[in-house]
């Protein structure tokens, strides 16, 4: 997706994957900095670990407590910091700037693909891990009306609910399943990644007939048991590919400036994810 995007923008950069042990994240980031990397993405478990390791935190990373995108920036003398793409030769000073593009990507994908407007919506959110917490807070920040949180480990859902009550007091947040209709059920658990996984919710307590739309953050397999059941129940459905696309497109925009070539990136994703 990123390499297709870079090619479409006419940039001779390359996007590569590196396996880094969490205890070596600090040295890996320092290495990327001295090698004049334009930027990088981080995935689990590095997103949270990177927060104290970057030189500056963007508001997005501070808000969600996780960094999934770093942009390296440079300056000469005491002029302002600029993205490395703007320098012909490596500048004297370089800093790492941490951003989070995940939260926006979730709501953008759900809005685009399912037509769900979050303001005033009633939502059942499954999962309160890293992705679930970010989704819950982002949805609450858009002033959803009611948010139902369900998680295998109830204490995690409780702490997310407490954070929402403190930060977004107008949102009604409840632990457990809704008894009437919801606009959206959103899966942020890892259940569905493996064929033998159980459904991410309890069918005795909630029926997909109660939901107008279902979004699964999982994109491989393309259709999880949750999405199959939701489709059969007449829900509008979408998988997490759009979220993956949008977090990546926003990262590319931070590195390269200007709009990302979304269609090219989406096509590359579809071709490469489902091989
Ligand atoms: P991510 O960053 O992808 O959110 P995570 O923080 O490990 O990863 O969260 C995984 C989510 O899937 C959590 O909500 C987790 O529930 P717990 O908080 O109880 O661990 C959920 N999950 C993972 N395996 C599960 C299982 N077998 N049954 C129910 N929920 C599960």
Image (cartoon, grey):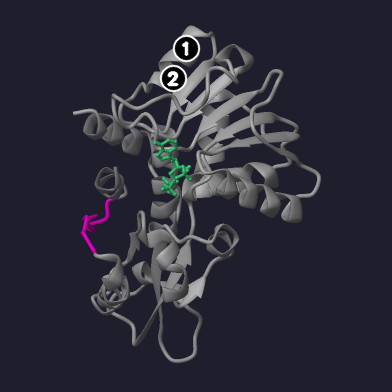
Question: Which residue is under mark 1?
Answer: 231
Counting other residues with Cα less than 10 Å from the Cα at mark 1, is it few (<14), some (14-19), or many (20 or more)? some
Q: Is mark 1 within 8 Å of ligand 1?
A: no
- How many numbered discs, if any? 2
Q: Position of residue 257 (x, y in %)?
A: 43, 57
Query: Quarter containing ligand 1?
Result: top left
Q: Position of residue 13 (x, y in %)?
A: 24, 58
The answer to whether residue 229 is left or right of residue 139 is left
For the point 73% across and 55% down, the residue is: 167
For the point 67% across and 47% down, the residue is: 161
Determine which quarter of the picture holds residue 42.
bottom left
For the point 57% across and 20% down, the residue is: 213
118 drawn magenta: no
Look at the numbered disc 1 and give the secondary structure of its residue. Answer: helix
For the point 41% across and 87% down, the residue is: 76
Q: Is mark 2 within 8 Å of ligand 1?
A: no
Kindly tell me whether residue 254 is visible in this rendering.
yes
What's the magenta region?
Answer: 10-20
């Amino acid at each position: 997706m990123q390499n297709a995007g870079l090619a479409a923008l006419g940039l001779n950069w390359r996007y590569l994957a590196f396996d880094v042990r969490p205890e070596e994240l600090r040295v890996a980031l320092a290495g990327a900095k001295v090698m004049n990397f334009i930027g990088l993405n981080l995935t689990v478990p590095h997103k949270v670990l990177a927060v104290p390791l970057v030189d500056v935190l963007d508001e997005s990373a501070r808000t969600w407590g996780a960094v999934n995108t770093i942009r390296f920036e440079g300056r000469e003398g005491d002029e302002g910091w600029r993205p490395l793409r703007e320098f012909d030769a490596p500048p004297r000073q370089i800093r790492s700037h941490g951003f989070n593009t995940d939260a926006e990507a979730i709501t953008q994908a759900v809005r685009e693909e399912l037509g769900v407007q979050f303001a005033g919506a009633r939502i059942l959110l499954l999962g309160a891990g890293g992705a679930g917490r970010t989704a819950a807070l982002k949805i609450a920040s858009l002033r959803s009306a009611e948010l139902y949180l369900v998680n295998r480990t109830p204490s995690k859902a409780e702490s997310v609910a407490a954070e929402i009550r403190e930060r977004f007091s107008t949102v009604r947040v409840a632990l457990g399943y809704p008894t009437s209709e919801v606009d959206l059920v959103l899966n942020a658990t890892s259940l569905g990644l493996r064929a033998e996984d159980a459904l991410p919710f309890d069918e005795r307590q909630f029926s997909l007939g109660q939901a107008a739309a279902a979004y699964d953050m999982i994109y491989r397999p393309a259709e999880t048991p949750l999405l199959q059941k939701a489709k059969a129940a007449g829900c509008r459905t979408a998988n997490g590919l759009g979220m993956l696309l949008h977090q990546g497109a926003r990262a590319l925009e931070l590195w390269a400036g200007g709009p990302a070539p979304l269609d090219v990136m989406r096509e590359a994703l579809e071709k490469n994810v489902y091989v």
